[in-house]
Image: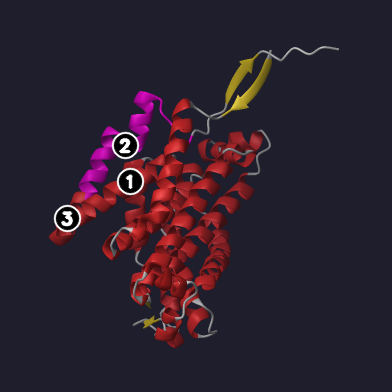
């Protein structure tokens, strides 16, 4: 008998087939959808990116951070600085946004990793506030009131003319389409990269560190190294997403870019209700979040109250989130990472 290890399931094979079709439809969406739909999809995709990276950090790494807004804001301001001060195009500056967030993440991790549990979470929040206050003193980029991207930079942005001529759109709508396509590519790279990581030996080590640090270290896992890897990866991806978000907005201020509500509280809500520690969870969560926001955004504080009550109810009924509850009862996993030993007969050979 020959044996092999696999992570695929019948459900995952079907999901892969439909997923390819869905990806093709999403890429073609600007051909038949209006500008409002493109903007809504951009919001969904960017929030999904932030949720996936926070889920990687907390759901798989066990590092519950409430300071992710530091990386969103730093990435966004790095993009604005590269465009305004250095004259770079906004599109390649998105990568510089990730590098800037990565640079901030190094001292953040150095201090935060000396804390555990709730102290770690609060520590990341405090560091994020310090970064916000420092950036607010950056007078060249508007100080506390913020600034906007130069009109020349947004008008002459890479690929805008091609989209404008190819789809027959105005300049502003073409920028929205460009931002949407970039968000879609980043979403696919994020989900694919995280899924690949979780299926490697580092993914097993990461899960071991999350479940029990001492036990993981006893079998040779370098817990400190794994924490650094997942923290820096999450910071870089979050910074890139922050740069992309504010490239599309074209306007920035410290309070908006470093908003704990927009870039951390909402992200945590998405992951918690969808299913922490799963790739499918944030996808479900972001769709529910967008639907609730669309229906309840005009109700002011009642909107936030509804989100809070819903999160509490789901945590009580389904501690692993809606997808976790569904997967537990049905056994269906669209992104399986559990390894299964499959046996089969070896082919006969003739000497």
The circle on residue 285 is 1
- Mark positioned earlier in the residue sequence (2 or 1): 1
Near mark 3 (Cα within 10 A), the count class, few <14, some 14-19 or many ≥20, is: some
For disc 2, the marked residue is 322
The N terminus: image quadrant:
top right
Q: Is residue 111 visible?
A: yes
C-alpha separation, residue under disc 2 versus residue under disc 1:
8 Å
Q: Are marks 2 and 1 in contact (CB under 8 Å)?
A: yes
- Callout count: 3
Is residue 181 rendered to the left or right of residue 300?
A: right
Residue 217 among those drawn in magenta? no
For disc 3, the marked residue is 296
The circle on residue 101 is none
- Mark positioned earlier in the residue sequence (3 or 2): 3
**x, y (%) of residue 52?**
44, 50
**Under tag 3, what secondary structure?**
helix
């Amino acid at each position: 008998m020959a044996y092999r290890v696999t992570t695929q399931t019948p459900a995952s094979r079907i999901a892969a087939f439909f997923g390819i079709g869905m990806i093709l439809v999403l890429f073609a969406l600007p051909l038949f959808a209006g500008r409002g739909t493109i903007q809504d999809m951009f919001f969904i995709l960017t929030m999904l990116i932030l949720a996936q990276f926070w889920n990687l950090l907390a759901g798989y790494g066990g590092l519950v951070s409430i300071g992710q807004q530091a990386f969103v804001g730093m990435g966004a301001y790095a993009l604005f600085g590269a465009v305004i001060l250095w004259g770079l195009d906004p599109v390649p500056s998105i990568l510089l946004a990730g590098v800037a967030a990565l640079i901030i993440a190094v001292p953040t991790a150095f201090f935060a990793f000396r804390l555990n549990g709730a102290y770690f979470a609060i520590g990341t929040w405090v560091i994020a506030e310090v970064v916000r206050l420092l950036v607010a003193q950056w007078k060249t980029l508007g100080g506390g009131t913020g600034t906007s991207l130069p009109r020349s930079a947004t008008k002459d942005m890479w690929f805008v003319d091609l989209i404008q001529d190819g789809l027959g759109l105005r300049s502003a709508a073409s920028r929205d389409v460009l931002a949407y396509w970039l968000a879609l590519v980043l979403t696919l790279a994020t989900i694919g990269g995280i899924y690949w990581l979780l299926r490697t030996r580092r993914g097993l080590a990461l899960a071991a560190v999350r479940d029990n640090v001492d036990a993981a270290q006893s079998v040779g896992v370098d817990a400190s190294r794994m924490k650094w890897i997942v923290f820096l990866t999450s910071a870089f991806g979050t910074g890139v997403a922050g740069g992309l978000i504010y490239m599309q907005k074209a306007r920035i201020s410290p309070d908006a870019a470093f908003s704990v509500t927009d870039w951390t509280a909402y992200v945590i809500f998405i992951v918690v209700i969808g299913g922490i520690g799963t790739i499918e969870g944030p996808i479900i969560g972001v769709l529910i979040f967008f639907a609730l926001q669309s229906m309840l955004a005009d109700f002011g504080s009642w909107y936030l109250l509804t989100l809070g009550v819903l999160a509490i109810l789901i945590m009580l009924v389904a501690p692993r989130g809606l997808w976790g509850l569904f997967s537990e009862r049905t056994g269906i996993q669209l992104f399986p990472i559990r390894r299964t030993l499959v046996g089969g007969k070896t082919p006969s050979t003739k000497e």
